[in-house]
Amino acid sequence: MRHLMSPLDFSVEELDKLLDLANDIEKYPDKYAHVCDGKRIATLFYEPSTRTRLSFEAAMMNLGGKVLGFSSASSSSAAKGESVADTIRMASCYADIAAIRHPKEGAPLVASMVSSIPVINAGDGGHQHPTQTLTDLLTIRSLKGRLDHLVIGLCGDLKFGRTVHSLIEALSRYAGVYFVLISPEELRVPSYITEGMRQDNIPYKEVERLEDAIPELDLLYMTRVQKERFFNEEDYVRMKDFYILDKVKMELAGPDMLVLHPLPRVNEIAVEVDSDPRAVYFKQVQYGVYVRMALILTLLELEV
Ligand code: NCD
C-alpha cells in the first residue's frame, strides 16, 4: 500500500504517468465518472482549508465516490484529546483512502504508519504540501509544455510556505531548472533546503527585490505570508505587504511569464492582475481537481 507524504515519494517517471492520467481525465471526464463507485475518501482536516479539502471531495465525487470527514480540529474528537493515530485507525473502518491536514509537521506520516488505507498528506504545518505540488506541476507542464529548463521565481514567505518547500524538492529533479528565491531576509527558504540544493548542485540565487528578478523569469510563484506560523503579530504585520504584484510590475515581465499562486491570496497580488492572461492561479485550481483524481486512482490502484 502506498501513501503520499512528499512529492519525492513518486519517481520522475511515476509523476509523468500521473500527470498524463490527469490530462486524460481533463480531456475525457466521462470515462472516469464511475471508477470510484462505492469508494469513500475521508478528509481529516485539523487546519483551515478551502481549496484542498473541497478539491479532494470534488475529485472523489467526479469519480463516482463519496466523501466524509471533518474540517476543523474543534469539530472532531481531537478536541477531546484523541490522537491522530487513533483517528486514522477509526477512519480506516469508514473509508478507502484518507487526506489529512494538520498543523504539526509529521502528523500525516504518523497516521500513515498505523493506517490500513492509503494516507495523503494534505499539508503538515510549515513542512510539505505534496498535492499542491502535483497541482503546480500539472499546471506548469500543461501550460508551458515542460518541467525542465525553466527559470522559476518563488516569492514571498519562503520560510513557512510549505507549498514552496514541496515545489522546490519536486522541480529540483528536472534538468536546467534555475530557482530565483525572492524573499525578505527574515522569510528566506530554510537552510536545510538550500543546503540540500547546494549538495545536489541545483542552481539558485536569493534576492530581495521582486522588480529586479521579474524580467528573467519563466514563471513567478507568489505566496501569502503565513500568518498562522508567526510567533507574534507585530512581525506578521511588518512582513505582510512586503510584496505586492501589480500591473506596473507585470510590465517588467516577459510575454510568456506565468503567474501561479497556491491561494488563498491576501494582498500579494493586486486584483487588477487577475485579468492578465499570464495570471493562471484560477486555472491552477481546476488542475488541482484533475491531479487529485489521478492521485486517488493511482493510490487505490484502479485501472480504467
Ligand atoms: C496553501 C497551504 O495550505 O499551504 N493553500 C493551499 O492548500 N492551496 C497555501 C497557503 O495557505 O498560503
Image: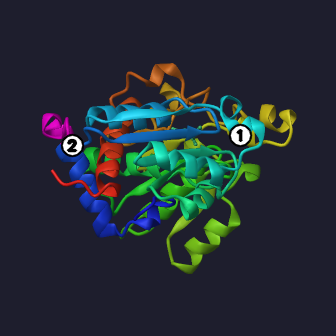
- Report if the CB atoms under discs 1 and 2 are less than 8 Å apart: no
Whether label 1 lies within 8 Å of ligand 1 gets the answer no
Question: Quick one: which residue is furthest to the front in this view?
Answer: 93
Distance between the Cα atoms at labels 1 and 2? 33 Å
Q: Which one is in front, 72 or 96?
A: 96
**Residue 78's disc number:** 1
Residue 66 rendering spot, x and y as whole percentages? 36, 33
Sequence-wise, the earlier of marks 1 and 2 is: 2
Crowd around label 1: few <14 · some 14–19 · many ≥20 (10 Å)? some
- The kind of residue on which mark 2 rests is Val
Where disc 1 sits, the SS reads: helix
Q: Residue at x 44, y 55 (%)?
A: 117
Question: Could you say which disc has been placed on residue 35 in the image?
Answer: 2
> Is 134 placed above or below 7 here?
above
The x, y position of residue 144, in whole percent, is: 28, 48
Classify residue 23 as left or right of residue 282: left
In reply to whether residue 189 is colored magenta, the answer given is no
Residue 28 is covered by the magenta coloring: yes
The residue lying at 50 percent from left, 72 percent from top is: 202
Kind of residue at badge 1: Ala
Residue 235: x %, y % from top left: 83, 38
Q: Quadrant of residue 236?
A: top right
